[in-house]
Image (cartoon, helix red, strand yellow):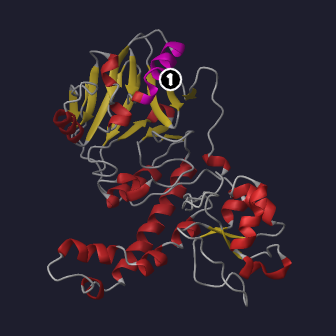
Amino acid sequence: MCEEEQQSPSRRGILRWGAAAAAVPATPGLANLAWPASASATAGSAPATPPPGGGAFYRAASGDTLRSIAGRFLGSEQRWSELYRLNQRVLGRGGEPRPGQQLALPESPDGAATRTFAPLPPGARPLPVPPEGYRLDRIGDALYAVTAGGTQAAFLVTSASAGVVVIDAPPALAEALPAAIRRVTGQKVTHLVYSHDHADHTANASAFGDVIRVAHTATAERIKANQDPGRPMPTVTFADRYRLDVGDQRLLLSYPGANHETGNILIHAPRQRAAMMVDVVMPGWAPIPAWGTADSVPGVLRAHDELAAMDLDTYIGGHVHRLGTREDIKISREFVHDLWRTTTNAIADTKMGPYFGKVEPGELPERYTSFRDFAPRAERAKPAIPAATAIRPAVR
């Protein structure tokens, strides 16, 4: 039975975002990566010379050598000489780094400006994938998560042959998701829940045929506008909260307001002490640019608050390589709140007038471009990112 609850949902502040794994220690290399700075590497020494085209910096730790740093960040110990040439002013005659010295990491050998990334922390690395080509995690008695290639979906199996409820139908799992369901049960899929309308999570919905499809009203409107045959129209919609009862299983669907996308919902499986909310918390990872391409940044923060207040053991985020925990939600929440607070303060402290004056009168779009690209403001916000958590975004 499906019935809409009468209470209106709480729209309290759900404030934040980020990424970091549960109780995962930082690797030595990651912990010592630093954003480019104008300060000297150590007291009395000259700063490293930034590589042409940009690059990351590394702050040397005890036991580091040029060879070990080159092997860790440049792909080969044989590139130690590039590090030496780029950082001669810092290294001096000794040739090897001292703890605390800030070293610039070079470009690729062909001279093209490249991005240099820190190694993945343990909690962000892909987990082993079985021969089937996907991971199948059982959550509680009857909820399952399917993960492959950094994409996730879930399904709930009922008793008494009431059917299977699928949560999202990503094209990337077009083969894995049905195969996983067949491994677990011979029952047919009878219900499909759209977390939101983004195609990377829903565009294979038509493969499940004529089932009951549940979505938020805003998701239904977007699906109707897109006219994508892979995403059939929902047959049941709701605005605030919805209780989906199928056989002996229950899902509680709620909408905390616009967040990653308008219509992106929180899906709670109380019996399994689990929740799924897509593209909000990514266990072990920071958000992709633009706060995860959010429709509403304050909404992303509110969603974090709501998730953090839930009594749950397992979180399904829709992406990355593993399931999450309450600790993942907590760290992600701390990260995004710090990022929001620091950037907000930096913007508030920056006067617009001088940057508006840099462009021709009447050039309205460029006025804001000049203000947005103000480098000192960005530099003020950067320290909040590595300071917020041991697991950080890739440093470029």
Nearer-the-camera pick, 52 or 286: 52
Decide if residue 309 is on the left or right side of residue 126.
left
Where's residue 199, x and y in %? 33, 35
Q: Secondary structure at mark 1?
A: loop
**Tag count in the figure?**
1
User: What residue appears at the point 50 percent right and 32 percent down from the top-left corner?
Assistant: 272
User: What residue appears at the point 28 percent right and 35 percent down from the top-left corner?
Assistant: 242
Residue 1 visible to an observer of this rendering: no
User: What residue appears at the point 50 percent right and 47 percent down from the top-left corner?
Assistant: 282
Q: Residue 112, located in which quarter of the rendered image?
A: bottom right
**Extreme residue in the front direction:** 110
- Tell me the residue that label 1 is attached to: 142
Point out the image quarter for the N terminus.
top left
Disc 1 marks a residue whose amino acid type is Ala
Decide if residue 324 is on the left or right side of residue 23.
left
Does the segment drawn in magenta span residue 173? yes
Above or below residue 385? Residue 160 is above
Nearer-the-camera pick, 286 or 144: 286
Where's residue 222, x and y in %? 21, 39
Magenta range: 172-184
Nearer-the-camera pick, 314 or 123: 123
Decide if residue 200 is on the left or right side of residue 91.
left
